[in-house]
Image (cartoon, coloured by chain):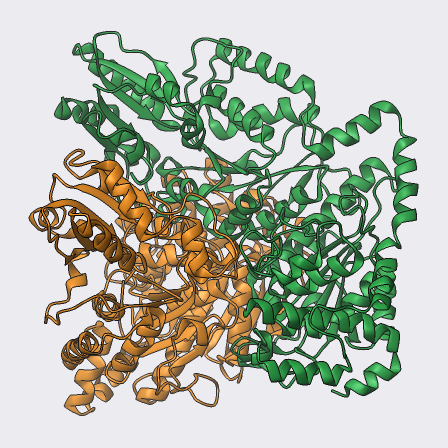
Chain colours: A orange, B green
Amino acid sequence: MDIAALKDAHPDHWQKACAIRVLTLDAVAAANSGHSGMPMGMADVATVLFEKHLKFDAANPGWPDRDRFILSAGHGSMLLYSLLHLTGSPDMTLEQLKDFRQLGSITAGHPEYGHAMGVETTTGPLGQGIANAVGFAIAEEHLRATWGPKIVDHYTYCIAGDGCLMEGVSQEAIALAGRQQLSRLIVLWDDNGITIDGKVALADITDQKMRFQASGWNVLECDGHDPEAIDAALTAAKSSDRPTMIACKTHIALGSSAQDTSKGHGALTDAQLIADTRAAYGWEHGPFEIPAGIKSAWEAIGARGAADRAEWDARLAALSDRKRAEFARAQSGELPKKLAKALRDYRAQLVADAPKVATRSASEMALNVINPILTETLGGSADLTGSNNTKSKEMTVFEPGNRKGRYIHYGVREHGMAAAMNGIALHGGVRPYGGTFMCFTDYARPSMRLSALMGVPVVYVMTHDSIGLGEDGPTHQPVEHLAMLRATPNTLVFRPADAVETAEAWELALQQTGTPSVLALSRQGLPTLRKVAKPANLTAGGAYVLAEAEAKRQAVLMATGSEVAVAMAARDLLEAEGIGTRVVSMPCMELFARADEKYRRKVLPSGAVRVGIEAGVQQGWDRWLCGERGREAKAGFIGMDSFGASAPAGELFEHFGITAAATAEKVKSLL
Amino acid sequence: MDIAALKDAHPDHWQKACAIRVLTLDAVAAANSGHSGMPMGMADVATVLFEKHLKFDAANPGWPDRDRFILSAGHGSMLLYSLLHLTGSPDMTLEQLKDFRQLGSITAGHPEYGHAMGVETTTGPLGQGIANAVGFAIAEEHLRATWGPKIVDHYTYCIAGDGCLMEGVSQEAIALAGRQQLSRLIVLWDDNGITIDGKVALADITDQKMRFQASGWNVLECDGHDPEAIDAALTAAKSSDRPTMIACKTHIALGSSAQDTSKGHGALTDAQLIADTRAAYGWEHGPFEIPAGIKSAWEAIGARGAADRAEWDARLAALSDRKRAEFARAQSGELPKKLAKALRDYRAQLVADAPKVATRSASEMALNVINPILTETLGGSADLTGSNNTKSKEMTVFEPGNRKGRYIHYGVREHGMAAAMNGIALHGGVRPYGGTFMCFTDYARPSMRLSALMGVPVVYVMTHDSIGLGEDGPTHQPVEHLAMLRATPNTLVFRPADAVETAEAWELALQQTGTPSVLALSRQGLPTLRKVAKPANLTAGGAYVLAEAEAKRQAVLMATGSEVAVAMAARDLLEAEGIGTRVVSMPCMELFARADEKYRRKVLPSGAVRVGIEAGVQQGWDRWLCGERGREAKAGFIGMDSFGASAPAGELFEHFGITAAATAEKVKSLL
C-alpha cells in the first residue's frame, strides 16, 4: 500500500484517520494485548462515516434520535474508543485509552455496553453486532411510524468483519433485514481478506456481495482507504430503498510490516514495528499525543450534530405534554401506571374462573391484557407463532407496508431473533419479546448470554418446556435447559405453575430494566392452583407456600411449573396417610435467592423432609434441597437424569417417574 | 396440482411414491400427531433417489461404503421410516410404523440415531442435518484418499427444508462445503414455500439458488414431482466437481385439501381429509396396507445394491490382513494397542520434566503423541488454531488438493464445526476433534447437545476456560459454561489441572465410543502437580487425592483445572497453621459420579470441612459439597457469581477472590 499517496491525496483526512491508527497502536502497546489491525484498516471508513454522515452529538451520547453505530467486529474496540475520545464523548478521556483492557477502566478488551457512553451494544462474540443492528433498524422503523419522522428519523451503521459474516447468525440477520427492507440499515464490510488462521480463503470462498444480493440487499463497494469513494458509497446507501452492504476493500494493519497478514489481526506490540509504522504514517508525535489541530478537527466533528440535536429537542418539546411524557416513559422502560391494576384485576378473575390451560396459553391471555396497555411491546416468534402463543389479539404484523405492526415473523431463526431483540431493547423506546421452543434456547444461547451480560430486559417466551411436549421426542424436550439458564448470571428464569403465576411472571419480567427474563411455559394444560386472589404478586418472592400441611408438617415439597400440580397431588396422598405436607411453588429461584433470609427460612423451614420436583435435571436444586445453612433435612429429587423420549406426554411422566405416587414414595423413604 | 396427470404420466412411479404418502397419513393418524406434509411433498424425489441413485443394501444398513441419506428436515421422519420399511430394512417392521411416536418404538417423532437402522443421524432441530452432511462428505473424501476408491467411494444425499436453510448453521455448512469443493455432497431442497407460520415469504425472500452459488455450489432445479426431471438432476449432480444443490419445486401435503398451506405442514388427522386424499391418489387399500406388488417393487430397490455390496466385501477381503484389521479397528472406534503405552510413557516423562505449561499447550503436546499413532483423527479449529493448539506437528491441511490432510480450517463457524464433527464421527472410520474458546460453546451448543443425545464420541477442545483468559473480557470469559455442560446428560467434561491430567483426559476422551467429551483447557501456564508417575490413569476415577493432609485432616479442598494449583497453595497456608488439608483434584465430575461409592467416600471422607474451588459458578458443585449422604461437613465454595471483567488474568483472580489466601480464610471461617 502506498501510504505516501494516501497522505498526499487527502492530507486532512489522513491526519484524522491517522489519529485513530496511532491511538490504537499506543493503547495496544500499553496493554500489551488487543487487536491492532482492524482499527488501522478501517480508520478511513470510520473517519468518513463520522465526519460526513453519522448523526450524533458527542456531548449527548444518549440523544434518542442519534444514528446508531455498531461495531460488530468488536475486537477492533480501539476504533470505537478512539472515535469516542477524539470526538469528545464525555467519559472517554485519554486516561481511559491509556488504561485500555485494565481493571476498572471503561475500555474493556471488547466494547461492553454500559461501560462507556457511545457503546451501543456489547460486541466481540462475532456476528452479534450485525444481528443487533437489524434489531436497532427494526426499532427505528417502528418508532418512526409510531412517533413520526420529526421525533424518530435515523440510520443504523454497522461495521462487520469476515468473522461476523462467517458466523451463521449473520445469515439470519441478513435474510431478516432483506425481507423487512430495512433501508436505514447500512453495513460496512471490512473486506480485508484476513482472519486469525490466515487468509479468509483458507475457510471461505463466498462471494459476499452476491450473498447479500440474494437476500434482497443493495450492494455497493468502495476502496476503503479512499475517502471520496467511501463518502460516495455512504451517500448512495442512504437513498436506497433496501438495506445496503458496502464492501470496503481494506488492508488490515495498514502501513505496518504486518499489513495484510493474520499477524496484523492481533496485538502489534513490537517497539520497532510501531516506530516503523509511525514513520511510514509520517506521524511525529509521542505516544497518546494528538496534536491540538487534529483534536480540534475531530471535536468539530463531534459537535457537528449539536444543532440538529437542539432542533430535535425543540420538536420534542413541542409535543403535547401527554405525548412527551409517554415518550419519556417508554424511553425509560417504566411501565404505564394502569398496567398494575389491570393485571391485578386479571389475576383476581383467573382465581375466580380457575381455567385449566397450558401456561403458554395463559401467557397469550396475559398478553391480551398487557399489550393494549403497554403499547411499546414488539412481539414475535421464530416460526412458532401458534405454538408459542406470542401474538396477542390486536397485534398486526410488522412489515414494510405496516411499520406500526407490533408482531415480527422472525422466521426459523432463534439466534437471529434473540440478537435482534437485544438490538431492539438497546435502541430504547420499545420492549421486545419473542418465542421459540424451550429446547431451542440452545440456538439462541449466544445472544441470550449477551442479554444477561448487557442487562437488557428482553423477555424470552420459551414454550414446550419439558417432556410434557410429548411425541416430538428428545430433540425437542428440554432437560438441562433450566439448569443452564439458572447458571447464567443476571437472568430471571420463571417457570409458572398456572395462569395466575404466568401473569405474575409477565408482570415481573416487564418490571425489569436491567435483566432479561425467560418464561418457561408448558405445552400441556395445567389447573389453576391459586385459590385466593391477593393484591400482592406472590411470584415476586420467587417461592411461596402454596398449600400448608394439614397434619403435623413432616414434608415440604418444592416444585415449579407443571410439577406443582404433581406436588399438590402427592400432598393429597401423603396427607391421606397422616403425613403433613407443605407445598412450595418456586416459580423463580433467582428471586427467591434475592429474598431476605427470614422469608426464605419461613418458606423452607428446617426439620421437614424436602423433595424437589421438576421435569429437568437436579443441578441447580441442591441449594434448596441441602438447605442454605447446612443440611437442614433429608432431601430428595424427582426429575430427569437422561434425555427424554418420544411418546404421549402422560406416558412419559409415568415412564420417567415424575408422578405424585413416586413423590409420595420418595417422601416416605426419607421419613 | 393435477394428481391424475402425475399418476398417468408415470404410473409405476406413482404407486411407489404413493406408498410413502399413505403410510405417512396412516402413521400420523394412528399417532394423532406428527408431520404429514413433508413426506407427501417429497415422496417423488425420495422415490427416484432410492430407486435410481442411492447406493445401499437394505439388508445391510451398516455397509461402510453405502451412500448416506440424511433427512435434515427431520420432522418428515415418516418419509425415512416409510422408505426403510418399504425397502426392507431389517428392523423397520410395519408394527413399528403403527407404533409411530409411541414409547419404546424405534419410530420416534424425529429420527433418532441408534433407534432404527438406516437412521444416519438425529435430526429435527433444523439445519443440523445439512451441517452433519458436510461432515459425512468430508469423512468420505478423506477416507477415499486414505483407503482408495475401491474401499471408499460414495455420495452423501441430504434433504433440507426451508427451515433448515433459514437456520444460520446452514450458512456455515454451505460455505464450508463450497470452500472444500465437496463434490460428493448433494442437497435436495424441498422448495415448497411453506413454514409453520405461513408462506416462507412472511420471513424470507432469499434467492436460495443464488445464495448457494455465492458459496461455490453447483445449483440445479427440477419439478419435484416429475420423476424424469428428478432423475436428470441427480444424474447431473453426481458428475459435478462441486457440491450440488437441487431446488426441488414441490407441493407440501400434495393432493390433500391442505396442500400448499401451513396446515399441511403438521399432522393431518381428519378422517375425511385422509379419505379424500386417498381417493385423490386412487389408493384403494386399507390403512397400513401396501399391495404385494408395490411392496415387492420396493424390496427390489432395497436389494439393488446387494451385488455392489458383495463386490465391495470381496475387495475388502482382498486387502492385506493388516490393512483389513486396521480398517475394522478404525470402524469400531477401538484405539490402537500401542497408544496406551505411548501415553503412559509420555505421562511418566511429564512427571519427570514437570513442565509449566498451559493445558491448551499440554493438549497439543498430547496430540503430538496421539496423532502419529491414532491416524484416523481429523483435527480442526474454528479459526483459532494457534490459540486452541489443535494442530499437531505432522498434520497437514485438509483441502481439495490434499484430501489426506487431517487438519480442517473450519472458519469462524463453531456451530458448523460441531455439526460437521457429528457427521464425521457418525460416518465412521475417523475421529474428529475441534477447538474454539470455551465461551463459544454457546455457539456450538445445539450440535453439542446432539453429540450427547446421539452418543457420538466427538472431542471438543475448549481453551481459554475461565477469567484466566484475561484482557479479552467478559464476552470471552466462560463463567456458567462448565455448569451448562455438566447439566447435559451423557457428556464428559474434563478440566485437567496440569499436563499429566491433560494427557489422561485425552486418553479417556478417545476411549469413549458412546459419549462426547469436552476438554476445558487453560490459556495460562500451570505447574505440573503430579509428583509420582503411575501406570494408572488417575483421571479415570474422576477425582483423586492429589495431596494428603500432613497435620490431622480438618479440611478437604476440591478443585479443577487452574484452581488445583490454588488449592495446593491454600493447603500450604493451612498446613503452616497446623490445619491438616487434603487436596482432591476433580478433573471429571461425571466419571467421579460413576465411580463406586466406596471410592467416592474414600476420596471425600466425611468429617472434614469441604471447600470447592473453580473459576466458574457454584451450580453443579453442591453434590460434592453437601455430600451425597446428607451434609457430611461444613462446606464452602470459592468461584464466580457474576460475569468476569477485562484485565490481566492475575488481577482478575485477585479481584474475584479466587486465591489461596481466600481459600484458606474460607476454610478457617468454617472450622
Q: Quadrant of residue B668?
A: top left
**In front here: B119 or A255?**
B119
Q: Quadrant of the N terminus of chain B?
A: bottom right
- Residue A201 seen: no
Q: Quadrant of residue A430?
A: bottom left
> Taking A214 as reference, is B420 above or below it?
above
> Taking B290 as reference, is B194 above or below it?
below
- B464 relative position to B258: left or right: left
Residue A645 drawn at (x, y percent): 51, 53
- B485 relative position to B310: left or right: left
Q: How many marks?
A: 0
Q: Quadrant of the C terminus of chain B?
A: top left
**In front here: A559 or B136?**
A559
- Identify the residue shown where x is 64% and y is 80%: B274
- Residue A650 seen: yes
- Identify the residue shown where x is 35% and y is 23%: B564
> Taking B490 as reference, is B46 above or below it?
below
Residue B544 drawn at (x, y percent): 39, 19
**Given the current orientation, which residue lies at the most extreme left position?**
A598
Residue A41 drawn at (x, y percent): 52, 56
Residue A12 drawn at (x, y percent): 45, 65
**In front here: B649 or B194?**
B194
- B622 relative position to B349: left or right: left
- Identify the residue shown where x is 24% and y is 30%: B630
> Taking A181 as reference, is B170 above or below it?
above
